[in-house]
């Protein structure tokens, strides 16, 4: 029985690379795995710059490749159990606009700041050399529009991390001092202004109808009685000086007021309210009715 002819392919592709005349430097795991090798047919050996031999363990690699460092990575914490004993600080604790002694401001007004942010508190604690954990989504119940909470470790194993800070009040005061030096425009300076600037609206006079005859009682316009002034207990809280900074500089970037536009709509509603009050004093003819005609018949 005849055998089938077998086809044999000859691989004649010249893929051999010339070996380097000089040993490759030992660059360690950080160096490149492959390097370009030039053929000796094109260039002479004298054209190559002298290369160093195998690097010692203490030597540093000159390769441009660098592994990513931990500084460029964003540190995220999923388990806050080790940080439970750290002191929690909210921006409302150092807010100069808040009243003192009601669970809000805990430092003197002159030592606080007008527009505190949780990021500023975390940066100030880092400058003081304290352990810091910034929780951007936590908020105080009375300060919902400015979220952010900072856990600070100012005691470690019963010892003070910073010998200057011995109590929680000193911790708040030192943080305020750091923020005041970084943002001097937010420093409260007496005398404080306790009255917010409000536009003055002149009272409108009631319009009297010029139509003669008897009119229903609903057609008579009466001016509403003036509202009694609101009674405020305690001292008035001062307001920050104007002009106020931008909204992004007053609250946290994670504030729901920025995403939903609550503060912007509130300001617009206040501005539009004055225009509607001014236009409401015009003549109103929709509610007025004509007088009834009486027909008198005379018999002759």
Image: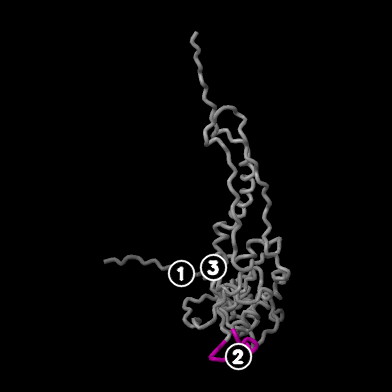
Residue displayed at 58% across by 60% down: 258
Say which of 212 and 95 sits in front: 212
Residue displayed at 56% across by 72% down: 102
Residue picked out by circle 1: 10
Q: Are marks 2 and 1 in contact (CB under 8 Å)?
A: no
Q: Is residue 43 magenta?
A: no
Instruction: Give the foreground label among 2 and 3.
Output: 3
Residue picked out by circle 2: 57
Kindly indicate the quadrant of the structure image that contains residue 14.
bottom right
Distance between mark 2 and mark 3 Cα atoms:
59 Å
- Residue 188 location (% of width, % of height): 70, 71
> Eyeballing the image, is 37 above or below 298?
below
- Quadrant (top left, top right, bottom left, bottom right) of the N terminus: bottom left
Tell me if residue 63 can be seen: no
Residue picked out by circle 3: 142
* Mark 3 neighbour class, 10 Å CA radius: few under 14, some 14 to 19, many 20 or more: few
Say which of 11 and 51 sits in front: 51
Residue displayed at 57% across by 91% down: 159
Kindly state the secondary structure of the residue where label 2 is placed: loop
Mark 2 or mark 3: whose residue is earlier in sequence: 2
Mark 3 or mark 1: whose residue is earlier in sequence: 1
Q: Is residue 158 magenta?
A: yes
Kindly indicate the quadrant of the structure image that contains residue 163.
bottom right
Residue range of the region highlighted in magenta in the rendering: 155-167
Kindly state the secondary structure of the residue where label 3 is placed: loop
């Amino acid at each position: 029985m005849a055998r089938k002819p077998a086809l044999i392919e000859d691989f004649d592709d010249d893929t051999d690379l010339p070996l380097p005349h000089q040993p490759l430097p030992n660059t360690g795991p950080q160096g490149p795995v492959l390097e370009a090798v030039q053929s000796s047919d094109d260039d002479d050996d004298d054209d190559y710059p002298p290369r160093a031999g195998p690097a010692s363990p203490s030597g540093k690699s000159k390769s441009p490749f660098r592994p990513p460092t931990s500084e460029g990575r964003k540190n995220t914490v999923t388990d806050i159990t080790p940080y439970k004993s750290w002191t929690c600080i909210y921006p409302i604790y150092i807010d100069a606009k808040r009243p003192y002694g009601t669970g809000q401001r805990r430092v003197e007004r002159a030592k606080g700041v007008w527009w505190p942010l949780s990021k500023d508190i975390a940066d100030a604690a880092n400058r003081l050399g304290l352990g810091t954990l910034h929780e951007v989504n936590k908020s105080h119940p009375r300060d919902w529009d400015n979220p952010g909470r900072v856990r600070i470790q100012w005691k470690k194993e019963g010892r003070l991390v910073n010998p200057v800070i011995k109590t929680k009040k000193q911790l708040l005061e030192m943080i305020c001092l750091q923020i005041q030096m970084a943002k001097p425009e937010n420093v409260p300076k007496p005398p404080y202004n306790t009255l917010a600037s409000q536009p003055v609206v002149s009272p409108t006079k009631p319009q009297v109808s010029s139509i003669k005859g008897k009119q229903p009682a609903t057609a008579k316009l009466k001016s509403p009685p003036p509202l009694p002034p609101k009674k405020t207990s305690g001292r008035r809280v001062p307001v920050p000086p104007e002009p106020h900074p931008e909204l992004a500089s007053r609250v946290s970037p994670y504030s729901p007021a920025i995403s939903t536009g609550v503060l912007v709509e509130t300001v617009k509603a206040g501005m539009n309210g004055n225009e509607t009050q001014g236009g409401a004093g015009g003549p109103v003819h929709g509610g007025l009715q004509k007088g009834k005609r009486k027909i008198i018949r005379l018999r002759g």
